[in-house]
Image: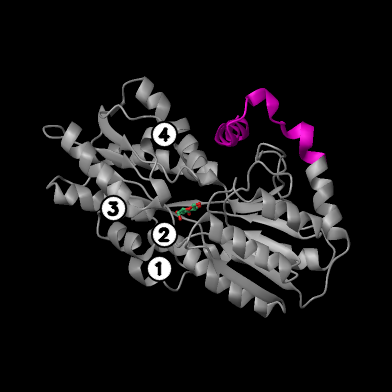
Amino acid sequence: MRTFTKVLAVTAVAGLALTGCGRSSDSTSGSTSSGSAAAASGFAADSVIGVSLPQKTSENWVLAEKLFNDDLSGAGFKQDVQFANGGVAEQQNQIDAMITKGAKVLVVGAIDGGQLGGQLKSAKEKGITVIAYDRLLTNTADVDYYIAYDNFKVGVLQGTALLEGMKAKKPNGPYNVELFAGSPDDNNAKVFFEGAMSVLQPKIDDGTLKVVSGQTKFEQAVTQGWKAENAQNRMDTLLAGSYTGTELDGVLSPNDTLARAIITSVKSAGKPIPVVTGQDSEVESVKSIMAGEQYSTINKDTRNLVKETVAMVVALQKGEKPTVNDEKSYDNGVKVVPANLLAPVIVTKANAAEAYANDPTLSPLTK
Ligand code: BGC
């Protein structure tokens, strides 16, 4: 059921008719064999590996840059790790340059997963294996693998935390809430929102939750570019328009950067801080959680994600098939991309010490 919803979510992002988009049985075998074909030959152990990252919209991307540099060079590769702070055109140019340099694998965290088709096609023509990292590459046949924390699960955990946090503060509803989503060009944003709404929509329907602004659609909730200022401005507007004499109990925030912007807005309006969700376990948000302000975050340990990605690259280098554990959920509009999905963990003040026990940066913040 959940898997089916996730396929629907991705399909909706791709903007395709549901019937036109291959379900798992239609295309899994094709995608798997293209992956194995890419893996069959292997390549030199000191090859160039290109890693193309999006903008620095959250700490996890910055950390990923360092970890890819360390782990790929540690494994003996020549790594080329780039950010595309300037936007989609810059990312396209960087990927072109990586192809020209002779990269054997491209690891791509896309700004807009639907805008790299030309680059991915030339990569495929040169026999390069393409791994979509964290964000799915959409509307292309030229992607071999996907690796990410389970995005739909992230949304489910956020929606559940929002409900539990509000219940702990006020045992009985109805609760007044507002909904925020990420950037519409990032394929993950819709999947996070769909995951959360799978939990929240039934509660809206039965009257437990009231979205006072009436803005319940993804398109109304989005935050262009994942920018804090955009979330803060929208929260300012919502507070002024819908909450002058009304209490706000909770806010669904898709990540920590936006959660802190929402809290800033509420504080400057002189209102009590509602239950606010998040994602990424950013240092400032973990501090905020421990101080009793932000309610929750998600632990998607970037160290594990990069480690698993580098393990996939090493398998390809040896001519082996990389680990995948899900060959049906991530339909990109053209094919179902074999995925290596990691499990996200919800973190509140109650389990922070346990959740970050092996994280030298975050663990001291929980003492
Ligand atoms: C990532 C999130 C991150 C967001 C903004 C998403 O694609 O999965 O972890 O918060 O981008 O950078």
Task: Give me the C-alpha separation between circle 2 and circle 1.
Answer: 8 Å
Residue that mark 4 sits on: 219
Residue 184 percent coordinates (x, y): 47, 42
- Do the residues bearing badges 2 and 1 touch, measured as CB atoms within 8 Å? yes
Q: Please state the horizontal and vertical placement of residue 171, each as a whole percent of the image.
A: 25, 34
What residue did someone put label 3 on? 261
Q: Nearer the viewer, residue 130 or 252?
A: 130
Of the pair 351 and 270, the residue shown nearer to us: 270
Task: Locate residue 234: give its quadrant.
Answer: top left
Which of marks 3 and 4 precedes in the sequence? 4
* Real-space CA distance between mark 3 and mark 2, rounded to the nearest whole angstrom: 15 Å
Of callouts 4 and 2, the N-terminal one: 4
Residue type highlighted by circle 3: Ala
**Amino acid type of the residue that numbered disc 2 sits on in the rendered structure:** Ser
Q: Name the residue: 78% across, 36% down.
A: 27
Q: Earlier in the sequence, mark 2 or mark 1?
A: 2
Q: Which residues are magenta?
A: 1-29
State which quarter of the image contains the C terminus: bottom left
For label 3, the crowd category at 10 Å Cα-Cα, with few meaning under 14, some 14 to 19 and many 20 or more, is: many
Q: Is residue 59 magenta?
A: no
Whether the residue under disc 2 has CB within 8 Å of ligand 1: no
State the residue at coordinates (57%, 68%).
82
Question: Which mark, residue 362?
Answer: 1
User: Can residue 254 be seen by looking at this rendering?
Assistant: no
Tag 3 near tag 2, CB within 8 Å: no
User: Where in the figure is residue 324, as x and y percent of width and height?
Assistant: 72, 51
Which kind of residue does numbered mark 1 sit on?
Leu
First reached walking from the N terminus: tag 3 or tag 1: 3
Q: Is residue 200 above or below residue 343?
A: above
